[in-house]
Amino acid sequence: MIRLDKHIEILLLDNDCVIVPGLGGFMAHHVCARYDAETQSFLPPLRQLGFNAQLQINDSLLAQSYIEAYDISYPEALRRIEDEVTELQQKIRNEGKCELNDIGALTLNDNGKIEFEPCEAGILTPELYGLNTIDIAPLRTTATVGQSEVSHAGTPHQEPKPAPQLAVAQDITRPAAEEEEPEEPATERTISIRVSTIKHVGTIAATILALLVFSLPVGQTSKPTVSESYMDTGILYNILPEQMRNADTAAKSVMQHKAKPVNREEVTAKETTKQEPAPIAEAITEQQFFSIVLASRVPEDNAHDFVKQLRSQGFDKAEMITRKNGAKVIYGRFSSEKEALDSLRNLRKKSGHFNDGWIMEF
């Protein structure tokens, strides 16, 4: 039973390239939103899928998906993938086509090579969920359509004579009304508006001047406030008990001590002590590393014995990582995937324990 399509679809949610060993690589391409002039609609953005049969290097993404899904080892996952790829190729040779659900179809051309037809709707992308096609007609089209509708609506009712007579009557009566009305009401309105505005401006100016003259005495505002604050402070200070007075004097001495000039060396020392969040970032970056996995999901006792055996043979970087579903035996901590792959190739020449090892990011 071919289950590759489900694993490929899930992996393409977070990755733009998934390589199937022995078959090829599926690559996702981002397509921006665009306007289709033929259908007069805006098409939403999507991710289209392509296929390249020349991509044969195993990136372990598909194998890791099989390990997590079926709780199997890395060699067993590679064997299952190889069996499903063989079954898929046999189906293409027999039927000429093989459908991959929600991905596309693989067909065999006249030259005996595999071609890929992607799904028209694109691959599943949560970021683009809910974006539909929008139909928008141009403004010229809407104007012509409106005029055509008006013309079609007027043709069946053929009553040409009453309409012109009404229009003529309206045209005749309008100038008469326009000649009689504009003289007297226009002058009365302008005069009344100007007089009222002058009255309102005068009353507002008078009230503002009265407030400025009578409510704000100039020259005596600062003295009462200073004398009252001084008297209130002295009264409160005399009422306070001796303990609180002593505390007040101690606080003043502390403030005076703080107000003394500070040396530049002390200021620079304080600034250096404040700027110390760097080790946190280093600790975060040190947590991410690449390592060679030699055993996965094994009992802790077996993993412990395996680590002892490796260290006795001179492989001191072997260690054990415990998880909920078992323990993993890893070797080394590398900063990049390339460094881990180079180390794995060299270790396979030294010991057979590293033949089934694979690279994993922690």
Image: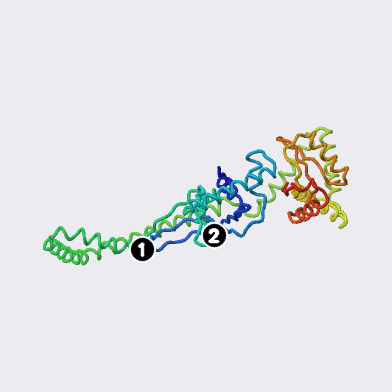
User: Closer to the camera: disc 2 or disc 1?
Assistant: 2
Q: Is residue 181 left or right of residue 220?
A: left
Query: Residue 206: image x %, image y %?
Result: 48, 56
Residue type (three-letter) at the residue carrying disc 2: Lys
- The residue nearer to you, when weighing 52 against 87, is 87
Query: Residue 351: image x %, image y %?
Result: 82, 48
Q: Quadrant of residue 36?
A: bottom left
Q: Pick out the residue farthest to the front.
A: 94
Q: Is residue 88 above or below residue 52?
A: above
Q: Is residue 215 left or right of residue 342?
A: left
Q: Secondary structure at mark 1?
A: helix
Q: Quadrant of residue 302?
A: top right
Q: Residue at x 65, y 51 (%)?
A: 221
Mark identifier at residue 113: 2
Q: Secondary structure at mark 2?
A: loop
Quick one: quadrant of the N terminus?
top right
- The residue nearer to you, when weighing 293 against 218, is 293
Q: Is residue 207 left or right of residue 149?
A: right
Label 2 to label 1: alpha-carbon separation: 49 Å
Mark identifier at residue 139: 1
Q: Which is nearer the N-term, disc 2 or disc 1?
A: 2
- The residue nearer to you, when weighing 328 against 269, is 328
Label 1 packing within 10 angstroms: few (<14), some (14-19), many (20+): few
Label 2 packing within 10 angstroms: few (<14), some (14-19), many (20+): few
Residue type (three-letter) at the residue carrying disc 1: Leu
Q: Residue at x 74, y 36 (%)?
A: 298
Query: Residue 266: image x %, image y %?
Result: 87, 54
Q: Is residue 179 above or below residue 310?
A: below
